[in-house]
Image (cartoon, rainbow, N blue to C red):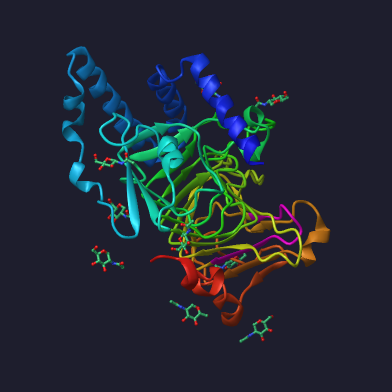
């Protein structure tokens, strides 16, 4: 399997080389962010503006024939952490002001000495690259400078990458991955109704024991492929349209913003055009599920909280504020009523216009305190006391 991914990566590199994308990526990013800005929320534009001004400044420097020292004058050298007994720091900066100019080259350079964690410190900017962290590279941390100023961006789709699973801008197969204050984006064109093969994943998280702190996830259909393993998301911003958090992982999302960008549904129309989750639990034996605690759900469209991608799909929302974009029925069984007995969809102490459970589908459950307690914290739900570094 690893070989397959490596080939796809080489292919992308080859495509890059032949299309001169690297030299023209300002136009490229401008184009996609222009398109994005129309439907998206402010953080994307902030990143775009920051990036564009950074490139303009660089261009300006270039005109004045300024040397590399000028570009690096602003480089925050003192912010880059020093190596410690337990961590080795690799620094990434687009302008070449420290160890690496691409994130992938830093990942490739990691080796394990004395079981240290590798802290990949990433300076502000948009890193236009497809990143793969293979199984052989556990214990890597990506530390960005803020999810509105540091981002990894690519634009593969299901069509361009042999299927949705391979379309992610960042793919994590290793265990113990940590990301802080950075965004993961897929800027492929937003699918139009009826489009086939336009799914575009921002990140695929396939390794066990991964955690994300203050991160952003930007895409449309299938933004966050929460594939497998135990994962923790704290204070993250997650944007998408259809099934924008999907997969078969066991994950706790705490204090996150869940933003639907499905098209607004005109007054009087009843159609539903988005879904937050598509959890993929296939059998009763699988220990997986998504729990959302103290999140905030808003945005546009009319959406379901979840669709039963597989028969034993399991999702809980607790203490979450839901705007009225949530359709009163709440959940969907993928139009397969035989799934209604095996689905586990629960709500507990939610608030807001979308949280009224009186019209919910019959298989949706209002959890009692005992049932809910399992889902409410990292220790009880994902064994966080054993691996989560708070
Ligand atoms: C880390 O290194 C310092 C100095 O070399 C040493 O004093 C300290 O005990 C080490 N800490 C651990 C946890 O090994
Ligand atoms: C990264 O840069 C620092 C500071 O220049 C240097 O000490 C360190 O050895 C470099 N690390 C690598 C992996 O190149
Ligand atoms: C990764 O970190 C964990 C926890 O600190 C440690 O038990 C494990 O041995 C490390 N693995 C590697 C390959 O460094
Ligand atoms: C990604 O963007 C580049 C540059 O605009 C374009 O040539 C390529 O077709 C895009 N890929 C996909 C899958 O849309
Ligand atoms: C993330 O950025 C915020 C704001 O800049 C800062 O307060 C916070 O400490 C950072 N968190 C991490 C985990 O880097
Ligand atoms: C994906 O590929 C199929 C088959 O080639 C094609 O019909 C479809 O239009 C493509 N989708 C997009 C979004 O380009
Ligand atoms: C919930 O919805 C039902 C049916 O529309 C309505 O009668 C009830 O007043 C609502 N409850 C709240 C708290 O808004
Ligand atoms: C909570 O619900 C479960 C499952 O329906 C039930 O077995 C249990 O007795 C309930 N607990 C309380 C405290 O109501
Ligand atoms: C997490 O939940 C478990 C089981 O409900 C409980 O015993 C524990 O005190 C909780 N921990 C925190 C930090 O809330």
Residue 377 visible in image: no
96 in the magenta segment? no
Residue 212 visible in image: yes
Residue 240 lies, with reference to residue 363, above or below; the image says above
Expressed as whole percent of the image width and height from the top left, the position of residue 188 reads 54, 30
Please name whichever residue, 321 or 225, is drawn nearer the observer in this view of the structure.
225
Please name whichever residue, 224 or 371, is drawn nearer the observer in this view of the structure.
224
Please name whichever residue, 390 or 31, is drawn nearer the observer in this view of the structure.
390
Numbered label tally: 0
Residue 123 lies, with reference to residue 356, above or below; the image says above
**For the C terminus, which image quadrant?**
bottom left
In the visual, does 218 lie left or right of 122? right
307 in the magenta segment? yes
Expressed as whole percent of the image width and height from the top left, the position of residue 354 reads 55, 59
Residue 90 lies, with reference to residue 191, above or below; the image says below
**For the N terminus, which image quadrant?**
top right
Residue at 64 percent across and 58 percent down: it is: 330
Question: From which residue to which does the magenta span run?
Answer: 306-317
Residue at 49 percent across and 64 percent down: it is: 320
Residue 374 lies, with reference to residue 102, above or below; the image says below
Question: Where is residue 34, by image quadrant?
Answer: top left
Expressed as whole percent of the image width and height from the top left, the position of residue 87 reads 34, 55
């Amino acid at each position: 399997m690893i070989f397959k991914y490596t080939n796809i990566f080489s292919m992308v590199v080859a495509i890059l080389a032949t299309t001169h994308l690297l030299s023209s990526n300002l136009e490229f990013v401008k184009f996609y962010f222009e398109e994005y800005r129309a439907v998206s929320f402010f953080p994307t534009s902030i990143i775009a503006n920051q990036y564009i001004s950074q490139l303009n400044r660089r261009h300006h420097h270039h005109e004045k024939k300024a040397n590399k020292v000028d570009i690096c004058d602003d480089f925050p050298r003192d912010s880059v952490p020093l190596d410690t007994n337990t961590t080795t720091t690799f620094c990434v900066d687009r302008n070449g002001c420290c160890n690496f100019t691409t994130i992938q080259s830093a990942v490739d350079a990691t080796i394990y000495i004395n079981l240290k964690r590798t802290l990949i410190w990433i300076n502000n900017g948009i890193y236009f690259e497809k990143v793969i962290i293979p199984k052989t590279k556990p214990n890597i941390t990506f530390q960005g400078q803020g999810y509105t100023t540091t981002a990894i961006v690519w634009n593969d789709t299901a069509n361009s990458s042999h299927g949705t699973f391979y379309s992610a801008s960042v793919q994590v197969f290793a265990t113990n991955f940590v990301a802080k204050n950075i965004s993961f984006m897929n800027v492929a064109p937003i699918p139009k109704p009826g489009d086939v093969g336009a799914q575009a994943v921002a990140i695929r998280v396939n390794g066990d024991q991964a955690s994300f702190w203050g991160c952003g996830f930007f895409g449309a259909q299938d933004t966050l492929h929460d594939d497998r393993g135990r994962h923790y998301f704290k204070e993250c911003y997650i944007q998408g349209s259809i099934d924008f958090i999907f997969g078969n992982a066991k994950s706790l999302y705490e204090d996150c913003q869940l933003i639907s960008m499905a098209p607004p549904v005109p007054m009087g129309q009843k159609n539903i055009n988005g879904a937050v989750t598509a959890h993929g639990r296939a059998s009763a034996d699988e220990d997986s599920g998504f729990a959302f605690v103290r999140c905030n759900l808003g945005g546009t469209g009319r959406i379901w909280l979840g669709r039963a991608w597989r028969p034993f799909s399991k999702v809980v929302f607790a203490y979450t504020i839901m705007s009225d974009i949530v359709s009163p029925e709440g959940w969907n069984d993928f139009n397969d009523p035989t799934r209604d007995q095996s689905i586990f969809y629960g709500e507990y102490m939610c608030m807001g216009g979308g949280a009224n459970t009186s019209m919910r589908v019959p298989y949706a459950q209002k959890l009692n305190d005992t049932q809910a307690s399992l889902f409410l914290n990292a220790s009880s739900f994902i064994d966080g006391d054993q691996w989560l570094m708070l």
